Image: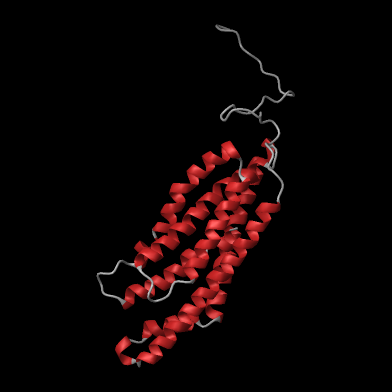
């Protein structure tokens, strides 16, 4: 689901970098405005992983995608008059959703393969994540540029506000926001498709060789393997 969840940070960076240029020098920079997103992921991901060990991954992953989808929609609805609290709230909601999804989803994927194949599965998971991230930025960037957001952003950055009529500035800002909102809504649509996939998939199963029991019980010994115990002092 990197295709739907990895471009919001890049899109938000573009938007709030522009906002920081338009406001006074005392305004927080775009990087500071974006910190609620990764911080939320960092806080929620370990908790969701612990919960997944107790209640399973399916509903946690689905709930995370639902929250992330809502966060993307709310981000797309922000405009030039949105307050800092609204921006941070939308980023936190999106980050919480991503954190709820990522760890349980990785757990479910790793549990779907035998213990002897988990190294390969981990590599495929990492490859899929990177490919999804790359496609996400490419897709969102193409939509953003296609709707005129990129050209409007360049025009706004190159032209001081006092050198252009206010109505022209307003038109450029609207074009920028149109591209921003269109790209985020596309990401939300991809996240919604992932949510449906998560809901219809079957219940996860523990990998072969793992005993079903209390958390931390550890893997069940392979019956084909023999354990040789060396006597003390031998």
Please say if 196 is above or below 84: above
Q: Residue at x 56, y 7 (%)?
A: 232
Indicate the colouring scheme: secondary structure
In this rendering, would 48 be left or right of 26? Answer: right
Q: Position of residue 119 (x, y in %)?
A: 63, 42
Q: How many marks?
A: 0
Where the C terminus falls, by quadrant?
top right
Q: Position of residue 141 (x, y in %)?
A: 54, 73
Q: Position of residue 54 (x, y in %)?
A: 57, 36
Query: In the image as oriented, which residue stretches furthest toward the left?
Result: 26
Q: Residue at x 46, y 52 (%)?
A: 41
Q: Nearer the viewer, residue 196 or 220?
A: 196
Q: Nearer the viewer, residue 106 or 117?
A: 106
In this rendering, would 199 be left or right of 158? Answer: right
Q: Nearer the viewer, residue 142 or 116?
A: 142
Q: Quadrant of residue 1?
A: bottom right
Q: Nearer the viewer, residue 161 or 118?
A: 161
Query: In the image as oriented, which residue stretches furthest toward the right?
Result: 224
Q: Residue at x 66, y 53 (%)?
A: 198
Query: In the image as oriented, which residue stretches furthest toward the top?
Result: 233
Q: Position of residue 173 (x, y in %)?
A: 42, 82
Q: Residue at x 41, y 85 (%)?
A: 155
Q: Quadrant of residue 130?
A: bottom right
In this rendering, would 82 be left or right of 224? Answer: left
């Amino acid at each position: 689901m990197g295709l739907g969840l990895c471009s919001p940070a890049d899109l938000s960076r573009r938007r709030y970098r522009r906002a920081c240029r338009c406001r006074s020098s005392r305004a927080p920079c775009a990087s500071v405005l974006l910190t609620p997103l990764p911080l939320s992921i960092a806080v929620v991901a370990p908790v969701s992983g612990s919960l997944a060990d107790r209640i399973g991954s399916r509903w946690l992953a689905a709930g995370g995608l639902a929250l992330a989808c809502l966060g993307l929609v709310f981000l797309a609805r922000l405009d030039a008059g949105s307050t800092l609290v609204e921006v941070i709230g939308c980023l936190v909601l999106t980050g919480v959703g991503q954190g709820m999804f990522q760890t349980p989803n990785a757990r479910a994927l790793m549990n779907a393969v035998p213990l002897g194949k988990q190294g390969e599965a981990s590599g495929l998971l990492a490859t899929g994540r990177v490919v999804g991230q790359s496609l996400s930025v490419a897709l969102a960037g193409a939509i953003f540029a296609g709707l005129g957001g990129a050209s409007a952003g360049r025009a706004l950055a190159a032209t001081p506000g006092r050198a252009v009529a206010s109505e022209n500035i307003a038109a450029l800002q609207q074009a920028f926001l149109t591209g921003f909102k269109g790209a985020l809504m596309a990401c939300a649509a991809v996240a919604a498709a992932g949510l449906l996939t998560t809901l219809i998939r079957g219940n996860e199963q523990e990998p072969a060789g793992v005993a079903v029991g209390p958390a931390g019980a550890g893997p069940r010994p392979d019956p084909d393997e023999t354990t040789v115990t060396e006597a003390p002092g031998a």
